[in-house]
Amino acid sequence: MDDRATQAYHLLEETLHARNVDVAAVRTALKQQEIETPSWGYADSGTRFGVFPQSGAAVTIAEKLADAAQVHKFTGIAPLVATHVLWDLPDDAAVESVPALAASLGVRIGSINPNVFQDREYWMGSFGNRNPAARRKAVDHCLRSVEIGKQLKSGVLTLWFADGTDYPGQSDFRERKRWFQDCLHEVYAAMPDGMTMLVEYKPFEPGLYHTDIADWGMSYVFCRNLGDRARVLVDLGHHLPGTNIEHIVAFLLDEQLLGGFHFNNRKYADDDVMVGSINPYEFFLIYNELVKEELNPRGNPKVEYMVDQGFNTKKKIPGMIQTVLMIQRTYAKALCVDRVRLAEAMGNHDVVAAEQCLLDAFNVDVEPLLRRVRAEMDVPEDPLAAFLSSCYQTGIERDRGIRTGAGGLGQ
């Protein structure tokens, strides 16, 4: 850090001390932060109207891990990579090659993600399909994903479904619920003791009349019925406009059923735009609930912090670095809340003072703090600028070019 940056850090440190913030503890927490980026975030993706391949987009699991390693190299906090079984690990040879390859790149495998929505058999659903053969295919794929998770030493099986109906009378809600519960039970029973099942919810699309796991309450019930290694996965884009997501997060934390996040953001519905890009204050309030739990742990299970974004117009790696830095910045701000003053204001029913505690933390410029932390972690103080000057992006665009079948939504 240069003299100006050092001075800015010390001024911020004084401000935070005056707000009852333990700056040393904040720096330690930031250094321990770990974010999982998705393999499919480095591959071509698209919209319902089409896929527009990018030059340099990854196709193989080796390329995806190499690109993810760049994000971790320049940020220092993204060591985990989610794998998508259908797109990344089509055969045993691919599975066997991954652990050594990931280790050589300085990353490791995070969650295992089955795909039960892409094949023709899932036209009318997967776990909720009336056809037993379709349900069997979906369960078998998830069982194989559990076995792959064992081989890759992954502790997380992430399940996200497109099951639903388009018209009243198309199917029976209760039957589908029971089919879902039976299928989930079979997969859950096959998991080793060290593996957690995360069950995501989605209010609509592609099922436009109903989806089978439409909100956090439905996911909650399924997980409660399964056992203590099944927890709710909150995708920030999977909520109707106006939903108070931080309330949901707090409720699930108190129930010890919050399993993790798919970080993204939405303007109207599941847009998968960059996390915090539409409503950064909402994202801060969500992280405030998470930090409250960190500071007063009650034996809650580990929360998984996972990115789930597809970059259609942004270049993949710079977009992912932006995302990781937004998560880091928001976490830092939540760590800077004056919790002594906030508790006093709550106790005195001082609504203005209580809200001001949150606004003060949200508005603080944490960049000097983050630069200090990055310097101590031996990563660039400005990760995005450092990556863009590294020539990695121009190199993969030159060497890979534009290809089809990029192991994601574009294949």
Image: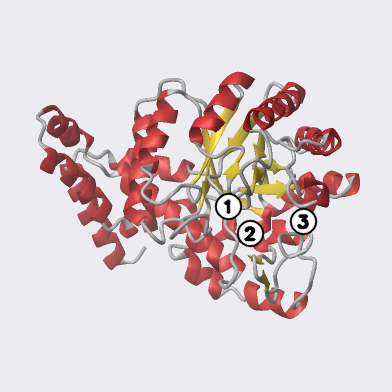
Taking the spot 75% from the left edge, 78% from the top edge, the residue there is 401
The quadrant holding residue 183 is top right
Q: Is residue 294 left or right of residue 140?
A: left
Q: Amino acid at mark 2?
A: Gly
Q: Is residue 227 visible?
A: no
Q: Which disc is residue 154 wearing?
A: none
Q: Which disc is residue 308 wearing?
A: 1
Q: Amino acid at mark 1?
A: Asp
Of pointers 2 and 1, the one earlier in the residue sequence: 2
Whether pointer 2 and pointer 1 mark residues with C-beta atoms closer than 8 Å, the reply is: yes
Q: Quadrant of the C terminus?
A: bottom right
Q: Is residue 27 left or right of residue 61?
A: left
Between label 1 and label 3, give the one nearer the viewer: 1
Q: CA distance from mark 2 to mark 1?
A: 7 Å
| Observer-nearest of 205 and 328 | 205
| Observer-nearest of 30 and 44 | 44
Taking the spot 59% from the left edge, 37% from the top edge, the residue there is 213
Q: Is residue 177 left or right of residue 259?
A: right
Q: Quadrant of the N terminus?
A: bottom left
Q: Which disc is residue 41 wearing?
A: 2
